[in-house]
């Protein structure tokens, strides 16, 4: 961890659940919480990468889970609860920004994209909220996207699901706020994960994207993780129902 990054006294021993935690932004979030001394449990479909991330941190565990299967999600969270305790923090990170043409989308594909990028966020909240209520509070952080703010094309089902994350965030903040459960969204810009670099972050689109940013630097996953840490910590005790942009001023 960089010496210039903050340490949060409220995060050691905090129990944190992360969805889609094996790689990309999710792995950075898992590692950031682990370095703060939190007890982290994550769910992911990738067994090999999940095992490697757990091996790198003493205080991290995982369950293999396809989040499109809600009963599987509930079972995975129950297993994490038995192992490390009830969640004080939930990070709804899992998503896939697969490109697709609007003209090719079938009802079946649309439903699968909603299940992949949106539906599990609500049911993950539903699964952890009773324990947070019993504990007298908690923090839920949903990962959104600035793709729909930018009117980005090439993935209408993904952009629609990510836009809906903001509605989910605000309505659940209202419903759970009386229990001192905070619900916020973190809104990344174009983050340079290995997946992005492999599939889409080529010189020409990168150059065009940088022209739209206020800042001249590409966004690394660590900066998404740092915002998530802040919102999970007691420093953010009065922050809820809001969206926190980490997109370098992209327009």
Image: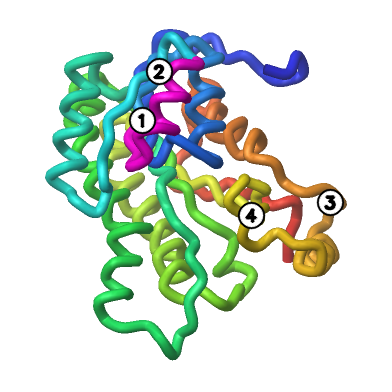
The rendered magenta stretch, by its main secondary structure, is classed as helix
Nearer the observer: mark 2 or 3; the answer is 2
From the top left corner, tell me how far across and down residue 106 is, in percent: 31, 83
Q: Is residue 216 above or below residue 57?
A: below
**What residue is pinned by disc 3?**
215
**What residue is pinned by disc 2?**
60
Indicate the quadrant where residue 157 lies.
bottom left
Q: Can residue 245 be seen in this view?
A: yes
Q: Which of 141 and 98 is in front in this view?
A: 98
Indicate the colouring scheme: rainbow
SS state under label 3? loop
**What residue is pinned by disc 4?**
198
Crowding at label 1, few (<14), some or many (≥20) Cα neighbours within 10 Å? many
Callout 2 touching callout 1 (CB < 8 Å): yes
Callout 1 touching callout 4 (CB < 8 Å): no
Residue at the (60%, 75%) spot, across then down: 151
SS state under label 1? strand
Crowding at label 3, few (<14), some or many (≥20) Cα neighbours within 10 Å? few
**What residue is pinned by disc 1?**
42
- Tell me the distance, in whole angstroms, between the alpha carbons under discs 2 and 3: 34 Å
Q: Magenta span covers which residues?
A: 43-56
On the rendered structure, is 148 left or right of 113?
right
Residue at the (37%, 83%) spot, across then down: 105
Q: In this view, does 97 lie above or below 34?
A: below
Crowding at label 2, few (<14), some or many (≥20) Cα neighbours within 10 Å? many
Callout 1 touching callout 3 (CB < 8 Å): no
First in residue order: circle 3 vs circle 4: 4
Crowding at label 4, few (<14), some or many (≥20) Cα neighbours within 10 Å? few
Does 51 appear in magenta?
A: yes
- Tell me the distance, in whole angstroms, between the alpha carbons under discs 1 and 4: 24 Å
Q: Can residue 182 be seen in this view?
A: no
């Amino acid at each position: 961890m960089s010496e210039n990054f903050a340490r949060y006294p409220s995060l050691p021993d905090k129990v944190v659940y992360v969805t889609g935690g094996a790689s990309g932004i999710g792995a950075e979030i898992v590692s950031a919480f682990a370095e703060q001394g939190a007890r982290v449990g994550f769910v992911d479909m990738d067994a090999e990468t999940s095992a490697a991330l757990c091996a790198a941190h003493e205080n991290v565990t995982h369950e293999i889970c396809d989040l499109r299967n809600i009963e599987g999600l509930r079972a995975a969270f129950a297993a994490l609860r038995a192992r490390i305790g009830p969640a004080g923090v939930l990070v709804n990170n899992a998503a896939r920004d697969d490109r697709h043409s609007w003209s090719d989308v079938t009802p079946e594909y649309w439903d699968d994209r909603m299940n992949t990028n949106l539906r599990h966020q609500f049911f993950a909240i539903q699964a952890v909220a009773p324990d947070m209520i019993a504990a007298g509070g908690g923090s839920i952080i949903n990962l959104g996207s600035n793709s729909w703010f930018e009117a980005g094309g090439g993935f209408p089902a993904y952009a629609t699901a990510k836009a809906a994350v903001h509605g989910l965030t605000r309505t659940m903040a209202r419903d759970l706020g009386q229990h001192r459960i905070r619900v916020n969204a973190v809104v990344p810009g174009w983050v340079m994960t290995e997946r992005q670099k492999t599939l889409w972050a080529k010189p020409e689109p990168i150059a065009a994207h940088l022209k739209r940013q206020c800042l001249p630097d590409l966004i690394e996953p660590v900066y998404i993780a740092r915002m998530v840490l802040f919102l999970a910590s007691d420093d953010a005790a009065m922050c809820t129902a809001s969206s926190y942009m980490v997109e370098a001023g992209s327009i």
